[in-house]
Amino acid sequence: MHVNRRELLASAAMSASAAAALAAPDFSAVRRDFPRARTAAYFDNASCHPLSVHTAAALHRYVDWATNEVGDPWWPSWTNPRSEAKNLFAKLINAKPNEIAFARSTIEAESNLLNGMDIQSSGGNVVTNDLHYTAAIHNYKMRQQAGLDVRVVKHRDWQIDMRDMERAVNNKTRLIAVALVSNVNGYLQPIKQISELAHAHGAYVYADIIQCAGAIPIDVKAMGIDFAACSTYKWLMGCKGFGFVYMREDLQIKVVKPTHDHGGVQYNYAPWTMRPDPNREEIIAGHGDGPARYEVSYPAYEGAICALESLKYIHRLGVNNIRAHARSLTDRLHKELPALGCPSITPKDNESPIVAFAVKDPKKVMEDMKKADVWVAMRFGNKMRIAPSVYNSHQDVDRLLAALA
Ligand SMILES: Cc1ncc(COP(=O)(O)O)c(C=O)c1O
């Protein structure tokens, strides 16, 4: 069902007060914030999370402005929300605001990090594992073909054995890169052990946090994460093409060189300047300050506006409450799906909102799900991924189980 703009704004205003009052959130009220939940049992949040009415209304306000009022070239009225979004994201992962830059994509951010660390020319190696996202592995594969020493540890029974990671790491390891939560089965990597291993060898840790930021508590300091990145279109309930990079303050510039810059240049010769300075070079490159040095051009205002609204919403609900809600649904799925002949490939007691199961007949399962308007993802042949979020209910789970039975 589609909602028109007026409906959206009215619904946003009405449920804003409901959401604000949620010390212990009422998740049935939360459900009303997500029009997608009205008809479908949508469990594909690990692919793309729907927008809430609050975020959609904020985006509409921006579109109105861009349509009817655009004029001031620097758009100051939208600059503050962008900084506020950075602050709220920093708070979400226990980082400082000056450790956060905007990004366009998780995969691009990881690639930029590798370029900035220039691991290859220093003769170093990178260790990762096959529960990292396949596009990231593709990036490593290309770099491997160009000569970078990349070690991809294989999972055992859909989890990582630290002894395998230990065997892959040596004193030339510069980076261990993992998806903190796997998109395949929701596996939460043993990040503290990984960071201790990395730091004991003088290496750093990168965590792709797109499948967990907003869904489970993340404390980059306590977890020993040095770099992280995510887009906002999954558990941050925002849109594509916009995200955040976390870069530990003391590693900026010293360990990771900016590989591009949003600053311009100054021409130090006529006719560009009336008084060229003979003691300076002809083209003087400027650079931004702090983490903005890792940003390119003007990061999308649309993305930041959605991120700000969604981050406010997530903070209001509380990540612990969000996790507990999803947990009640994933615990049930974990119990009931194996009884229907679908063994789990997600470890038990795993702290993420993503669970995956092996099904016998993936084609038929997807046809049945479609008929029932139940949305799950089928990946890697027969691995069915179910990823409930804040608006999903036990009735949604009933519907999924009925479709499967
Ligand atoms: C673990 C993981 N990393 C990265 C991505 C891609 O992120 P982006 O589109 O921000 O590059 C995905 C998308 O599904 C993912 O699941």
Image (cartoon, rainbow, N blue to C red):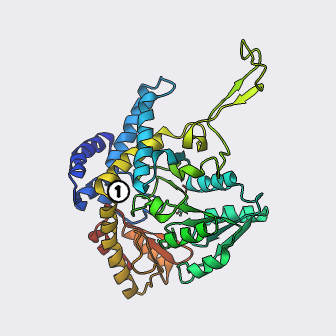
| Quadrant in the rendering for residue 403 | bottom left
**Residue lying farthest to the top in this orientation:** 274
Q: Is residue 122 above or below residue 196?
A: above
Q: Is residue 345 left or right of residue 256?
A: left
- Residue 323: % across, % down: 34, 66
Image quadrant occupied by the C terminus: bottom left
Q: What residue lies at 66% left-to-right and 32% top-to-bottom?
A: 286
Q: Is residue 278 above or below residue 323?
A: above
Q: Is residue 125 visible?
A: yes
Asked if ligand 1 lies within 8 A of label 1, the reply is no
Q: Along the line of sight, which residue is nearer the eye, 254 or 240?
A: 254
Q: Amino acid at mark 1?
A: Arg
Q: Is residue 203 left or right of residue 319?
A: right
Q: Is residue 143 left or right of residue 199?
A: right
Q: Find numbered disc 1 in the image and state the secondary structure of the residue it sits on.
A: helix
Q: Is residue 200 above or below residue 139?
A: below
| Quadrant in the rendering for residue 391 | bottom left
Q: Which residue is mark 1?
A: 36
Q: Along the line of sight, which residue is nearer the eye, 398 or 222?
A: 222
